[in-house]
Image (spheres, grey):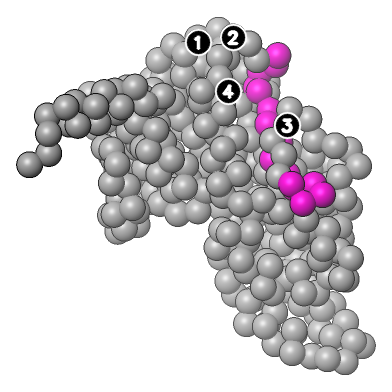
């Protein structure tokens, strides 16, 4: 039998956790950085609402979320009626969020999955001239796929995200943090050498960042504080692993090293998220607050400014 004093200390420790009493809604929370953030928020005492289109994906993710309460939000973000129904359900159950993290993104996975076989075959070609010819052919195919999925990416990353942000404006309480995950390829879209395969996401997420900046005063006047966390290539996500395995080998040795040195992990993005959630928004110098997460000289940095000379921005991908 566990002594009562030990139980009391454990209960006191849980009561003193920093996110006790907070319920964070995370879109794209069933995998990748979204799931990693949910796990950490629960570890720090919070509850999570996991946004996904799939009940099956929610159930699988919930198996990893065992340190606190987990609520489902099953909706396609491009369908406003589904989104509103789920919000009404949360309200009815008295489970509305105190904070919001938008981790969901779309517009690349569908066609990237379709060309992985061709990428694997490409890497087997040793003759550089032959490889270059095949790269040119594949670049044309990627360009076609990018154009095909542009409207799909906009529906998810801009139209759907904007509509959901408006819903959050209506329901989040005073003091809420509203966090948007992005990448320098998106945040600095007009300055970066964004890879062709990432264009559908980068362009539409950049539109969303501009909208968030334009509407930040409206949010802060209501006591909702927006923030953008922009991270370089996250190598331990599923997409990051595909890029490292099949696309980075097509770069020069120097460019590969630059990408690996500047890369980050899901944990680094989560650390930046926790920093935002813990911070006092009244002390932020701008809205939306920006944090940049990037590797430099073998170290990961979380900073309020992104260095203009960071080599990550200069690497040119074959497509």
Q: Where is residue 3 in the image (x, y as percent from the top left)?
A: 12, 34
Mark whose residue sits in front, 3 or 2: 3
* Distance in Å between CA atoms under marks 1 and 3: 24 Å
N-term-proximal mark, 3 vs 4: 4
Task: Give the residues drawn in magenta, as a range.
Answer: 285-299
Mark 4 secondary-structure assignment:
strand
CA gap, disc 3 to disc 4?
17 Å
Given this view, does label 2 or label 1 mark the residue nearer the observer?
Answer: 2
Q: Which mark is residue 79?
A: none
Separation of marks 2 and 1 at Cα, in angstroms: 10 Å
**Residue 282 circle label:** 2
The residue labelled by disc 1 is 223
Assess disc 2: are there few (<14), some (14-19) or many (≥20) residues with their C-alpha within 10 Å of its C-alpha: few
Instruction: Using a 10 Å C-alpha cutoff, classify the residue at mark 3 as few (fewer than 14 neighbours), some (14 to 19) or many (20 or more).
Output: some
User: In the image, 212: left or right of 187?
Assistant: left
- What separation in Å lies between label 2 and label 4 (alpha carbons)? 12 Å
Q: Is residue 177 on the magenta stretch?
A: no
Q: Nearer the viewer, residue 287 or 249?
A: 249
- Tell me whether circle 2 and circle 4 mark residues in contact (CB < 8 Å): no
Query: Of marks 3 and 2, which one's residue comes earlier in the chain?
Result: 2
- Mark 1 crowd level (few <14, some 14–19, many ≥20, 10 Å Cα): some
Indicate whether 225 appears above or below 57: above
The residue labelled by disc 3 is 303
Question: Which residue is drawn at the image coordinates 61% and 26% (left, top)?
Answer: 227
Q: How far apart are marks 1 and 4 (CA)?
A: 10 Å
For residue 226, the mark is 4
Residue 306 % position (x, y): 80, 35
Is tag 1's residue or tag 3's residue first in the polypeptide sequence? 1
**For the residue labelled by badge 2, is the local secondary structure a helix, a strand or a loop?**
helix
Above-or-below relation of 292 to 92: below
Quadrant of the image occupied by residue 95? top left
Q: Which residue is drawn at 84% across and 77% down?
A: 136
């Amino acid at each position: 039998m566990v002594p009562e004093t030990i139980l009391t200390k454990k209960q006191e420790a849980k009561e003193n956790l920093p996110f006790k009493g907070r319920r964070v809604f995370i879109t794209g929370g069933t995998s990748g950085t979204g799931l990693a953030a949910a796990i950490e928020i629960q570890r720090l005492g919070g509850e999570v609402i996991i946004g996904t289109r799939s009940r099956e994906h929610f159930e699988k993710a919930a198996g990893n979320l065992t340190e606190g309460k987990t609520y489902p939000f099953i909706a396609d973000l491009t369908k406003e009626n589904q989104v509103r129904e789920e919000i009404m359900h949360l309200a009815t159950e008295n489970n509305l969020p105190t904070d919001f993290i938008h981790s969901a993104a779309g517009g690349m996975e569908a066609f990237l999955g379709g060309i992985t076989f061709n990428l694997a075959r490409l890497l087997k070609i040793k003759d550089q001239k032959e490889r270059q010819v095949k790269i040119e052919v594949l670049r044309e195919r990627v360009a076609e796929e990018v154009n095909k999925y542009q409207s799909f990416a906009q529906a998810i990353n801009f139209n759907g995200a904007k509509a959901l942000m408006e819903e959050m404006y209506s329901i989040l309480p005073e003091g809420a943090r509203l966090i948007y995950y992005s990448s320098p390829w998106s945040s600095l879209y007009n300055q970066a050498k964004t890879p062709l395969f990432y264009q559908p996401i980068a362009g539409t997420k950049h539109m969303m960042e501009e909208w968030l900046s334009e509407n930040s005063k409206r949010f802060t006047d209501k006591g909702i504080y927006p923030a953008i966390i922009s991270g370089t290539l996250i190598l331990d996500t599923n997409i990051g692993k595909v890029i490292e395995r099949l696309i980075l080998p097509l770069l020069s040795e120097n460019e590969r090293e630059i990408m690996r040195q500047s890369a980050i992990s899901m944990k680094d993005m989560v650390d930046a998220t926790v920093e935002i959630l813990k911070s006092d928004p009244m002390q932020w110098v701008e809205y939306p607050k920006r944090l940049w997460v990037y590797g430099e000289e073998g170290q990961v940095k979380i900073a309020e400014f992104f260095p203009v000379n960071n080599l990550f921005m200069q690497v040119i991908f074959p497509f």
